Amino acid sequence: MNYDIAIVGGGPSGLCLARSLSGQGLAVTVLERQPEATLARPAFDGREIALTHGSQALLARLDIWSRLDQQEVALLRDASVFNGPSPFALQINAEQAQADRLGHLVANHAIRQAAYESLMTAADTELRCQTELKGISQLADAVELTLTSGEKLHTRLLVAADSRFSDTRRLLGIGAQLKDYGKSMLVCRMQHEADHQQTAWEWFGYGQTLALLPLNGRQSSVVLTLPASEIARLLCLDETDFATEMQDRFNHRLGRMQLVSSRHAYPLVGAYARRMIGQRSALIGDAAVGMHPVTAHGFNLGLGSVQRLSALILAAHARHQSLASPALLERYQRQQRLATWPLYQATNLLVGCYTSDQLPMRLLRNVGLRLAQQAQPLRRSIARHLTQPA
């Protein structure tokens, strides 16, 4: 079969790209390993997504935002960054950008389901589930995809959107800079006595990193980063002992806490593709850039790659030009690197600085936070970056 665009990976980035290209007369297919039932009703996975204003606007244009249960969408008004036991915090406030919020928090599985539902209404798109890519060959004017079933597909442009450990990227011969942070992340939802005031916390404690993402009511998504062995121990605790330990880890700042969801653990590994493009191919989402979650910006970067690539494809299609010309792909790569490389490097620097427990580094980051708090232009710049429209 012949397609204009084949997208490998039915995660949020892949589904959003397919939806953004729909209705334009392009034949688009999405190849996904999982059964369709898993995409239609994805299970809770513990991850909450902090959406910027720009990401929300894009989801609205793709008919995804309106499909979310608005009672499950939480307001993210402000953010605070703590260091160790110090009560001092760097404050990032929405009002610094003359906005009513920094963004919204939405469960990852809810976004996935809404993206699937939106794609099911789209024209010119096809979703092929339980389909796995085995090989890639370059033809004179197309890419030939060989599936594990033996079937062969032809496409004018191939897009990899299959995670930071992308098999498609590997089949294309594109390497990636992988950074194993040597720790794991535990995520869950917890009820607590104290009011979070719709403020996110990033708390760089000694020997641990804690994050709190405010949900509706007095519930929050709790993110704890520790060595894998410690995370494994916490997963084995009963609910009462787990809640007691989390109260202690938060220094009782939230009062009594209660576990209200399942617990999930993920290894922390960053990824940055050495090239964002190949011959008649491009990488988006985590296949291009997989961020450390400390800045809560990975999903927004993924949507940014969708927006950049789809805009170039649709412009070329409108002018009856090649969808996979070297010039188009090089332009995408330049835009993608400019938008992601500085933040990726800054995030790794931040992680290295704020997760070190050596005394000089502890003192340095305390000084750094205080200087940043006094630097009003810096705080306003961060707030405006989060609240600017797409």
Image: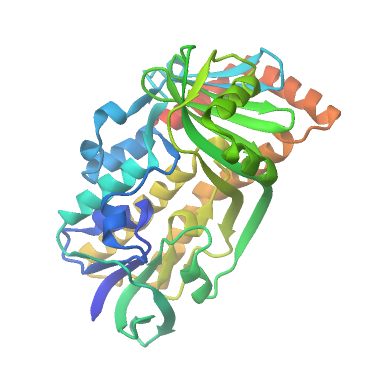
- Is residue 390 in view from this perspective? no
For the question of whether residue 72 can be seen, the reply is yes
* Residue 381 in the image, given as x and y percentages of width and height: 52, 26
Q: Residue at x 58, y 44 (%)?
A: 292
Q: Quadrant of residue 214?
A: top left
Q: Residue 365 at what x, y percent from top left?
A: 74, 26
Q: Residue at x 69, y 45 (%)?
A: 229
Where is the N terminus found, in terms of image quarters? bottom left
Give the vertical position of 267 relative to 174 (above or below): above
- In the rendered image, residue 281, in percent from the top left (x then y), is placed at 41, 70
Asked which colour scheme the image uses, the reply is: rainbow
- 110 sits to left or right of 258: left
Locate residue 206: give its quadrant: top right
Q: State which quarter of the image contains the C terminus.
A: top left
Q: Is residue 314 left or right of residue 98?
A: left
Vertically, is 344 above or below 94?
below
The correct choice, above or below, for 51 with respect to 96 in the image is below
